[in-house]
Amino acid sequence: MKECPTILEFISYVWYSNACALGVFFEFSDYKRWIERTHEYANAPSPIKASLYELGKGVLCLILFVVANEFFWMDYCWSDEFLTHSLPYRILYYHIAMTGKRFFYYGPFCSTTGAIIASGLGYNGTKKDEKTGEETHLWDKIVGIYIYEVEMIRSPIEGFKYWNYQVHLWLKFYVQQRLVEGFVTPGKRAGAWVGIATFMVSAFWHGFYPFYYVMFFFAAIMNEVAKDLYKARSIFSKVIPEPLQWIVANQVTMVSLNYLGCMFNALTFTNGTKFGGATYYLPFVLATVILVASRTLGLVKFAQKLEAKQAGKKVEDPQKDIPKEEKKEIVDSGKTQPKADIQSSAEGKSVQPAECPPAPKEESPSNETKKTQ
C-alpha cells in the first residue's frame, strides 16, 4: 500500500461480514482490489459451484460431529465420573472425544471459506495445466482450514500450520516476523521465546479464559520438541520400522494435540485442573522433560554427529552454515504457507507457495515470500 485507506475503506475492511464469525485474516490490498474489481478480480467467474462445495463440506462435518458427540462428549472429560475409569481408558476417551470435536470446528471453518468464495473475495486467478494447457479457476486465496492436511499430520508443526490457516499467516508475518526483526541478531536463529511469545499473542486473540494461556504455552513447548525430534530423527528411524513410522508419528501427534484441544475446551481453572489431574498432565510433563533433556544433553548435535560419522563427514556447527535465505527469517514455529497460491500486493505479484513437508521438518519460513502491501 502506497497510501493510507480512507475511513470508509478501513471500516468496510474491518466489518467485512463474511469473515466476521471467525475473524479470518486477509490482506487489505486483496480486499481493495476485490472492491474495485481490478487485477485478478476483473474477470472472476461465478463462485456458486465452489462456494456450495465448501458449504457442503461444512454441513457434512457438522453431521459427523453430532453423531460422534452422542457417544463421546467433551464435557465428560472433567466430570467426577471420568475419574472412576482407568488411565488408559481416560486417554483413549479424550482422544476420541476431541477427534469428534474437531469436526465441530471444521463446519464453521468450511462455511466461512464458502461465504468468502461466494462474495468473490476468495478468487485466486487461474492455474494452467502444463500437459493439457487447460486453465482452472482457483478459489483458495482465503482458506480457513485444510482438513485433509490436518488429519494427515505427523508433527505438531504441521498441525499448527494448517489449522486456522489465515490467522496463522497473520501471526507469522505480523507478530513472529516482527519479533525477530526487532530482537534477534541478523543471521542468528530465533530462540524458543519467540515461538512462546507468538503463541501467547494467539491466546490473547482467542480470549481471556485461563486455560487458553495454559494450552498455548504448552503448544509452543510441543512445537519446540517437534523441531528437536525431527533433527534427531536418525536416532528413532532405526527403532521404528519404516512402514509404521507414519502411523506412529500421526497418532502420537494427534494424541498430543487432542490433549491441547481438551485443555482449550476446558476454559476454566476448575475444568482444566480436573481434566489435567485425571490424566496426570502426562503430555505436558513428557513434552517438558523431552525438551529439557534434548537441550541439556545435546540430542540434536549427537544425532548430527552420528549421521556424519555414518556418512564419513566432518560435523560442523549447525549455526555456522545457515543458508543465506534463512538469515533473513526465523525458526519455523509451524506457521508456514501450504499449497495454496495466495495473491499478494496491489501490484499484482503472487506469493509462491512453500513446500508441504513430508515430515515434521523444521523449515525456515524464508521459503515463503511475505505478502507485500
Image: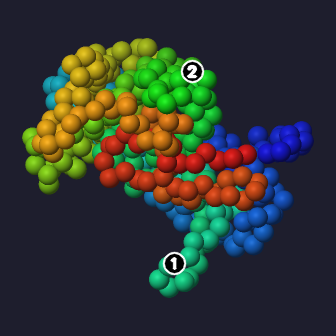
Q: Sequence order check: which comes first, mark 1 or mark 2? A: 1
Residue drawn at point x = 75 percent, y = 50 percent: 29
Residue drawn at point x = 72 percent, y = 70 percent: 44
Which residue is tagged 2? 183
Mark 2 Cα-neighbour bin, 10 Å: few <14, some 14–19, many ≥20: few
Mark 1 Cα-neighbour bin, 10 Å: few <14, some 14–19, many ≥20: few
Q: Is residue 296 left or right of residue 33?
A: left
- Which of discs 1 and 2 lies nearer the camera? The answer is 2
Residue 20 at x, y = what percent?
A: 68, 42
Q: Is residue 247 above or below residue 264?
A: below
Q: Quadrant of the N terminus?
A: top right
Q: What's the residue type where badge 2 is placed?
A: Phe
Q: Is residue 208 above or below residue 171?
A: above
Q: Is residue 299 above or below residue 273?
A: below
Between residue 42 and residue 56, name the one nearer to us.
42
Q: Is residue 154 left or right of residue 146?
A: left
Q: What's the residue type where badge 1 is placed?
A: Asp
- The image quadrant that residue 171 belongs to is top right
Q: How is the image coloured?
A: rainbow
Mark 1 to mark 2: distance in Å?
44 Å
Q: Secondary structure at mark 1?
A: loop
Q: Secondary structure at mark 2?
A: helix
Between residue 301 and residue 49, name the one nearer to us.
301
Q: Is residue 43 left or right of residue 285?
A: right
Could you tell me if residue 105 is visible in this image?
no
Between residue 178 and residue 72, name the one nearer to us.
178
Residue 129: which numbered mark, if any?
1
Residue 84 at x, y = what percent?
A: 20, 21
Residue drawn at point x = 37 percent, y = 51 percent: 357
